[in-house]
Amino acid sequence: MTRILLVRHGQSEGNAGGIIQGRTDFGLTDLGHKQARLTAGRLAGEGAVRILSSPLKRAWQTAEPIAAALGITVEPDPDLQEFDVGEVSGLTGPQARERFPDLAKLWPHALPGAESRDAFHERIRAALERMVAMDTTVVAVAHGGVVSGICYAVLGLDTSRRSLFETANCAVSEITADRSGRLVLSRMNDTCHLEALVTAADRG
């Protein structure tokens, strides 16, 4: 039966530095590693038989202790990578606003070099469809924008609307299938396992 446990990566060096990450490949901070270990403990008894991860370091380093706790191997899924924000990648918020005075109007899909809305949501839906087809309990370690995009797909929301979801580092969200096979968002942004070590800045 389909059960997908979505995990946002732990706090990254980019998160801690207030950097807009996109595809910029930061690893975890010490706090991020601790969050990942706590998440591994939380998910150890969930019965997952597959774990997929974005290949970006911050996600992969979060997935590794979870996989160890589950006794399985991490499988890379490039479709779980964060939204590519183009030329603002690697900039802080103030730097991005200085370089792009109309940042609020451009964000995120009209930014120079950014991934298009349609391309982003198409790959998110493709990743979701593959996980559903596995018909088992799957952990997917990804990014704030990806978790939000999957929730949009499950709920059938208009993708042109600004994000309705915020996801903390190492928060767990859950998608299940009801008896008719309809996907349901049954848990969102669960941080109970983090012992108040919650970091919520959502810059990928």
Image (cartoon, rainbow, N blue to C red):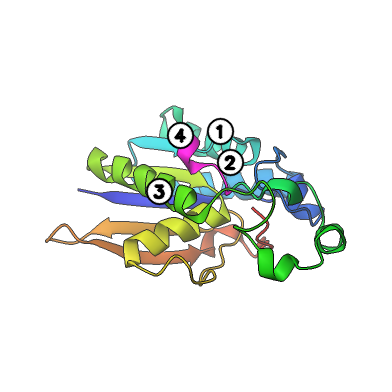
Magenta stretch contains residue 139 = no
Looking at the rendered structure, the kind of residue marked 2 is: Ala
Q: Secondary structure at mark 1?
A: loop
**In this picture, residue 199 sits left or right of residue 151:** right
For image coordinates 55% across by 36% down, the residue present is 65
Q: Nearer the viewer, mark 3 or mark 1?
A: 3
Q: Secondary structure at mark 2?
A: helix
Residue 190: give its label: none
**In this picture, residue 68 sits left or right of residue 175:** right
Looking at the rendered structure, the kind of residue marked 3 is: Glu
Looking at the rendered structure, the kind of residue marked 4 is: Asp
Q: Position of residue 125 (x, y in %)?
A: 36, 49
CB-based contact (under 8 Å), mark 1 and mark 4: yes
CB-based contact (under 8 Å), mark 4 and mark 3: no
Circle 4 is placed at which residue position? 77
Circle 3 is placed at which residue position? 122
Q: What distance separates the C-alpha of mark 4 from that of mark 2?
A: 11 Å
Q: Nearer the viewer, mark 1 or mark 2?
A: 1
The tag earlier along the polypeptide, 1 or 4, is 1
Residue with the most extreme left position = 180
- Magenta region, residue range: 77-83
Circle 2 is placed at which residue position? 59
In the rendered image, is residue 121 in sight? yes
